[in-house]
Image: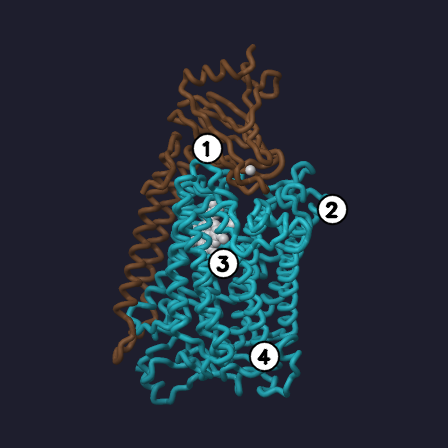
Chain colours: A brown, B cyan
Amino acid sequence: MSWLPEDVSTFGGEIDRLFYIIYYITGAAFILVTVLMVLFLVLYRHREGRRATYTHGNTALEITWTVIPAIVFVSLSFMSVSTWGKIKAHAPPADVQVQVTAKQFNWEIVYPGPDGKFGTEDDLQVDNDLHVPVNKVVHVILKARDVIHSFFLPNLRLKQDAVPGRDILVWFEAVKPGKYELPCAELCGFGHSGMRGWLYVHSPEEYAKWVQETWPQK
Amino acid sequence: MSDSVTAQAHAVPAHHEELGFWRTYVFSTDHKMIGRQFLFLGLFMLIIGGLLAMMMRWQLAWPETEIPLMSWVPEPYMYGGILPPPTYNAFFTMHATIMIFFVVMPIMVGCFGNFLIPLMIGTRDMAFPRLNMLSFWVGLMSGLVMLSSFFVPGGPAASGWTAYAPLSAQAAFTGVNWGQHLWIISLILLGISSLMGSINYITTIVNMRAPGMTYFRMPLVIWSLFITAILLLLALPVLTAALAMLLFDRMFGTSFFLPAGGGEPLLWQHLFWFFGHPEVYVLVLPAMGVTSDILSTFSRKPIFGYHAMAFSMIAIAFLSWVVWGHHMFISGMNPLLGTAFMMSTMVIAIPSAIKTFNWLGTLWGGSIRFTSPMLFALGFVSNFLIGGLSGIFMASTPVDIFIHDTYYIVAHFHYVVAGIIFALFAAIYYWFPKMFGRTMNEALGKTHFVLTYTFFNLTFFPMHILGVGGHMRRIYNPTQYDFLQPLQGINVFITMSALLLGLSQLPFIVNFIGSLITGKKAERNPWQANTLEWTAPSPPPHGNYDAIPVVYRGPYEYSSPEVKEDWLPQNRQLGTEATAARAH
Ligand code: HEM
Ligand SMILES: [Cu+2]
Ligand SMILES: [Cu+2]
């Protein structure tokens, strides 16, 4: 099964691993229940002369099929917690910072410029093109101007709603240079479909060159 | 209180004086007529909701091409049969709203709740018949208000059935003004209608059960409607309050949800999902109840683990108040809350697992009759299995980061919510003889099942694959995205299956209308079932029973060794000889 898009982030592997664990567990449950169901439907179809078994249940069996799913579900929760904490709660220190403001129907991307500070003269603002270096921790400060949008990078397994009135910090570290799509994933109006940008992940040299060429110079 | 209500109900004479046409068919206070009215309302809305879905699917497979037969729709709603983006958004908003609030709720809760509760607990009518009538008429008004929004300038609401603020809170954001107002007003009306219904259901079940009908002798479908009514009673006021706030934001410039005025967009989501998650159980519990009853009847076997079935519904009634945050993992809510909601969501999956296993246990050792209702009930179980398992993926917070707001979610909720349609059909095929006094055609019923089951799965299963590929939900044109290009073939496949799924409903329409007019006259108990409704005539007269039945046992005594036949009605008194046999 390789329906998942290529993963180029540092934490994407953990998400995919959880996905596959759940996939195998639920797949097994699905096969078990379906096979039993089909089997019962065939074995116990109505035939003249045979009477159905008269039973109201079986406590031991019922306890078993309550406890086993309970254990599985609780274990899945615990497995999920550490990955969730890593992605959400413990962002590593930033190498690069950008501000992304979502608005109907564009991503407004602001780079801090050579002084490294936002809200100063040398900020660079462009629509929809997000340039970052490879193997560096990128912090994105996510804002929204009008309605809720959602910052979605399928290849980085990253999605975060951008909510008006809030600054939300998300981070990622891309491990492979390339050009990746950045769609909006939350309904934001009639132009929602087609609201997208691009993430350019550059090698260090390319990134330096891009900074050189596009950022305002000191 | 309990005594006086019961006494009053029992005092109603079994055979009424003739009521005129209006009092019998239109302004009826008879729970069975009100049930039928809800059924026709729901089936009519199902056609509209279904046609909207077909048009959306056309757009997704062959974007911006002319939809057959639709070139008559005026601009700007369509351009020569081509759907523009604002209309697409309006369509998915109305599709979901109609299916949830005007198809599944009116049929599963309104129709079967009304029809079955008095008949199955053994009473003559609802506790408050006039309130019941009012509940239908307010419900109908709500439906008309919702449909009228198709005809106002700007078209109907286009902010999704979830109506996330600020998108829904200011006309400028969607370009829809009156359509969204009417959507809000309609749902407030529907809330009032359901509130009246649920008060009625709860009162009737608590106070008016026939002698001997203890709580744990009630059929599971009654249990499910009881819990549903309680959930509705507690959840709807929250939605109504949120809708009122939204209407105030839109009409009077308050800023409950608008940050510019000091409001909080996430407040809407918390309120909406605090209602919304119990709501999904409102939709699914009656389907589970119906399925339990039908599986038991046609396996000719007691339901496996009756008490576990009832208690798992009671557990759901409590747990469904503490899981709403699983819709908001990536909304910007505190990540610690995300963890808490993941835990509670994993816990609420346990009762669903229990129910599935108990259904399997019911089949085990049965003597299974593959009638149309049975086939549809089995279809529900099979769909619910897939929908329940896909829920586990989304419950895991890290996995949900990726699949939230993709077609994976669309697949999940169609397996559970659209899967309810299987229970809905099962219920119609099962109770049609009682409701209309005529029998439906089995061959057409089975054809309907085979086609529906096949194309349902061919339509919705591939949506999981789209979702895993990252395909966002609620997008107008997937071909606008480079990374979705390889998935477009799946979209075409889904659309063709969906169109065939739509066509597969023709045997049902023919069967339903044909049987109403020319169906064979039904006996009292065509399925040889145990519950009380089958002891009344088909269809039952005003007042239901000649004499109020007395209940001696639970509803699922099939193949009991106490009797020769393989069924043993709840109200059949066994002779002393059988009682003695039981003592051994
Ligand atoms: C087995 C237990 C279930 C689990 C673990 C589960 C889990 C979830 C989760 C986590 C979500 C949110 C996903 C997201 O938006 O990212 C969700 C969405 C949804 N679920 Fe379930 N679910 C379960 C059963 C059900 C049932 C029984 C129903 C309805 C009858 C249902 C109906 C829905 C609907 C309608 C949505 C989507 C709402 C929307 O965003 O429009 N689910 N489910
Ligand atoms: Cu957007
Ligand atoms: Cu939920």
Q: Residue at x 26, y 79 (%)?
A: A48
Q: Is mark 3 within 8 Å of ligand 1?
A: yes
Quadrant showing the N terminus of chain B: bottom right
Q: In terms of sequence position, does the residue under pointer 3 or pointer 4 come before the other?
A: 4
Q: Secondary structure at mark 4?
A: helix
Depicted B478 relative to depicted B362: above or below: above
- Mark 1, residue position: A181
Horizontal side, residue B578 vs residue A197: left or right = left
Give how far apart the Cα atoms at labels 2 and 4 are: 48 Å
Q: To which chain does the residue with label 1 belong?
A: A
Residue found at the very far bottom of the displayed protein:
B576
- What's the residue type where badge 2 is placed? Phe
* Disc 1 with disc 3 on a shared chain: no
Within 10 Å of the Cα at label 3, are there few (<14), some (14-19), or many (20+) other Cα atoms? many
Q: Amino acid at mark 3?
A: Tyr
Identify residue for label 4: B6
Residues at marks 1 and 4, CA–CA distance in whole angstroms: 66 Å
- In three-dimensional space, the C-alpha distance between marks 3 and 4, rounded to whole angstroms, equals 30 Å
Q: Which residue is mark 3?
A: B281
Marked residue nearer the N-terminal end (2 or 4)? 4
